Image (tube, rainbow, N blue to C red):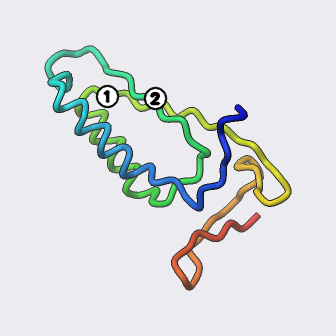
Amino acid sequence: MEAFTFNEDGTKVDDMLAQSISYFEQQGSTGRSTSMQLCFIISDGILNNRDKVRELIIQAQLRHILIVFVIIDQPTQERTSILQMKLWLPNEKGKMQILN
């Protein structure tokens, strides 16, 4: 846990998911059988683009890739726990603003 800093402004889960799906396709391990491939994602749980992530998860399912999100949360005085977040919206500058 000490290696996780949680200092990033955001997590580009959508880009990472797209790259992961592409990797599985390049390996030729998608869609050929009924067995599922596992893709583990370790994240702080803050998603920049929920709609795109939802779309990519559906694409992964269609390719027999099971996405497993492992959320690591480390609340501090500067950072709210994901369990306490109720709503997040982009502010006027396009940055995500968390409303508790």
Residue with the mark numbered 1: 65
Quarter location, residue 65: top left
Residue with the mark numbered 2: 40
Q: Secondary structure at mark 1?
A: strand
The residue under the point 45% across, 54% down is 12
The residue under the point 38% across, 23% down is 38
Where is 96 relative to 18, above or below? below
Q: Position of residue 81 (x, y in %)?
A: 76, 50
Is 10 left or right of 25, judged from the image as shown? right
Quarter location, residue 24: top left
Q: CA distance from mark 1 to mark 2?
A: 10 Å
Q: Compare marks 1 and 2 and give the one earlier in the sequence.
A: 2
Q: Position of residue 82 (x, y in %)?
A: 70, 49
The residue under the point 32% across, 21% down is 37
| The furthest residue to the right | 77
Is 97 left or right of 35, judged from the image as shown? right
Is 70 left or right of 58, judged from the image as shown? right
Where is 29 relative to 20, above or below? above
Disc 1: CA contacts within 10 A as few (<14), some (14-19) or many (>=20)? many
Q: Position of residue 7 (x, y in %)?
A: 65, 54
Quarter location, residue 52: bottom left
